[in-house]
Image (cartoon, coloured by chain):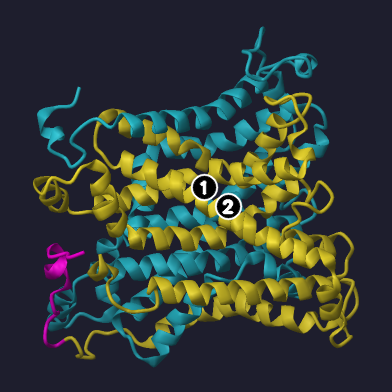
Chain colours: A cyan, B yellow
Amino acid sequence: MESPRRRRHWTKRANPVAGLGAFIWLVIVLVPIYAMLSASLTGADKALTGNPLRPPSDPTLDNYGTVLDSDFGHLLSNTAIVAVVVVGIVLTLSIPLAYVAVRTRDRWSNAAFRLFLLGVAIPAQAVVVPLYLLIAKLGLYDSLPAVILPTAAFAMPVSVLVLVGTLRDVSEDLYEAMALDGASPLRMLFQLTIPLAKGGISTVVIYSALQAWNGFLFPLIFTQSDGPRVLTLGLFNYVSQFGVNIPALLASVVLSGIPIFAVYLVARRALVGGLMGVGGK
Amino acid sequence: MTTTVDKRQAAPTAPTRNSRIGRPHAVWALPAVLFFTFFAVVPMGLAFYLSFTEWDGLGDPRPVGFANWQKLLDDPRLTQSLSLTVVLTVASWAFQTVVALLLGVWAAGRQRNRAVLSAIFFVPFLLSSTAIAILFYALLDPNFGIIQKDTLGSQSGAFLAIVFVGGWQFIPFHTLIYQGGARQIPEVLYQAAAIDGAGRYRQFFSITLPQLRHTITTSTVLMVVGSLTYFETVLILTKGGPGTDTAILPYLMYEAGFKTYDFGYASAIASFLVLAATGLSLVLVRLTGFGTMRSTREGM
């Protein structure tokens, strides 16, 4: 039941058509997830006979054991390292750039901003061949930095756009007040801009962490050995490694989702709120 | 459409706004510019250079003039791949925008069941493209899967699978963007419309849609740029097949470069991709007004 106070919000009456549509989408979202969980609990011997929509007759965790016995932990820690370092690089570089673009607005800062504006359109796929050459010449081939550096670079354009959008909304009056107190630009950045731009900054953290977490092409092409292998590439290798053992393959997909799902449960408000902010711009 | 509500947000700033005191020097932007230039802009230039060479990944690239470009223009797969990329982008855009916009506007209401449902809706976005491609690869397997049919073996089946899987993954994200946009629409607009006797559908088309136009462009830019990342989905789900029926441009480039080690030809495809994407983004940037240094709230 809707409380009277809530009824005053602009969606005043129940909307059965929209409710039905939302329900249909719920089914579309849940059926594949259910099928995946159910199949991952099915014994490998029964996998080819059953329909994945039928619940497993005697559920087993064997498939999860199979995956964990391979190099899963190693893949996970590599991915975590990549994500953390990428977020660090993106924030360290993008915040000063966005700050200059919004506050200074001379020819040079405008040009810098426009570079990133155009950068949004550079598809990672398009530069992967020359990057391969560059990474090899730097002696970084088949190492974690080979994944980290390009991933961070390609997370920057959208991050810069989001940050500039957020920083624009910090009132000029506040800067004026701090300027009267004799504050340096650096102090303004740390005491005014960053605290007021928390929303945009958390969006950038989430966006770049997801880019790093989901990245596939750069790891595929810039690494080769087991050492620097990340989770997405590990999953891709499982496709051939587990062959027809689809339950084990699906168990690996479930396991790959658990860490980020855990983060989602803990930080849902910040995560969703941050991304939602993109739409307000 | 008149928006009287937002005038105060666009209020002129203090008269001293042009004072240089307390403004950071443009040099603060330098680290970001250098980093991005080295890892994104320089490689883009290099891709053009390499497109005029023959190179197998070992030794040094050997200049061959326009040979790769000639080969590209003569390649029947280019036309196929290009139209495939365009059709895929448009189909994905239409599917994702319609569903995400409706879901987002619906979810912007504040009842409890909507909050719970939106939380569930978001779950697919937590899986990586690779994981999702593998999930659907398994679920569409003719022996194992939900549909006991060789969906990926037919051209239309494979194409629709890619559009659907892309939507399944990204609609949650765009729903969230639209939810955020819809929440920022001032309620007085709806109150005024209700007083004028406008019904729900009238309100949707006369208030919600026009008010969401910036959200629609933001979401569209992200979708168009993102549609190129369907590479993983294509690589895992269909390997470009059946035949070459789902070989989008990035997939062609990957095959040329990292399967047949023809890096010169791969670079020609890549350069073509850059040209297409840059042209597209120039148009989009112009349309969205991202480039103007005004607060985007003014236009709301």
Query: Residue at coordinates 61% horizontally, 79% vertically from top-left?
Result: B41
Q: Is residue A19 left or right of residue A48?
A: left
Chain under disc 2 = B
**Identity, as a three-letter code, of the amino acid under mark 1:** Phe
Dividing the picture into quadrants, the one containing residue A97 is bottom left
- Between residue B16 and residue A47, name the one nearer to us: A47
Q: Look at the picture and state if A74 lies above or below B255.
A: above
Magenta-span inclusion, residue B240: no
Q: Quadrant of the N terminus of chain B?
A: bottom left
Q: Secondary structure at mark 1?
A: helix
Q: Are marks 1 and 2 in contact (CB under 8 Å)?
A: yes
Q: Residue under label 2, please give it.
A: B91
- Between residue B34 and residue A48, name the one nearer to us: A48
**Identity, as a three-letter code, of the amino acid under mark 2:** Ala
Magenta-span inclusion, residue B8: yes
Q: CA distance from mark 1 to mark 2?
A: 6 Å
In the rendered image, residue B47, in percent from the top left (x then y), is placed at 73, 78
In the rendered image, residue A277, in percent from the top left (x then y), is placed at 33, 55
Q: Which residues are magenta?
A: B1-16
- Between residue B88 and residue B34, name the one nearer to us: B88
Dot 1, crowdedness within 10 Å: few (<14), some or many (≥20)?
some
Dot 2, crowdedness within 10 Å: few (<14), some or many (≥20)?
some
- Residue A273 seen anywhere in this rendered image of the structure: yes
Q: Secondary structure at mark 2?
A: helix
Query: Residue at coordinates 29% horizontally, 42% vertically from top-left?
Result: B108
**Disc number placed over residue B95 in the picture, else none:** 1
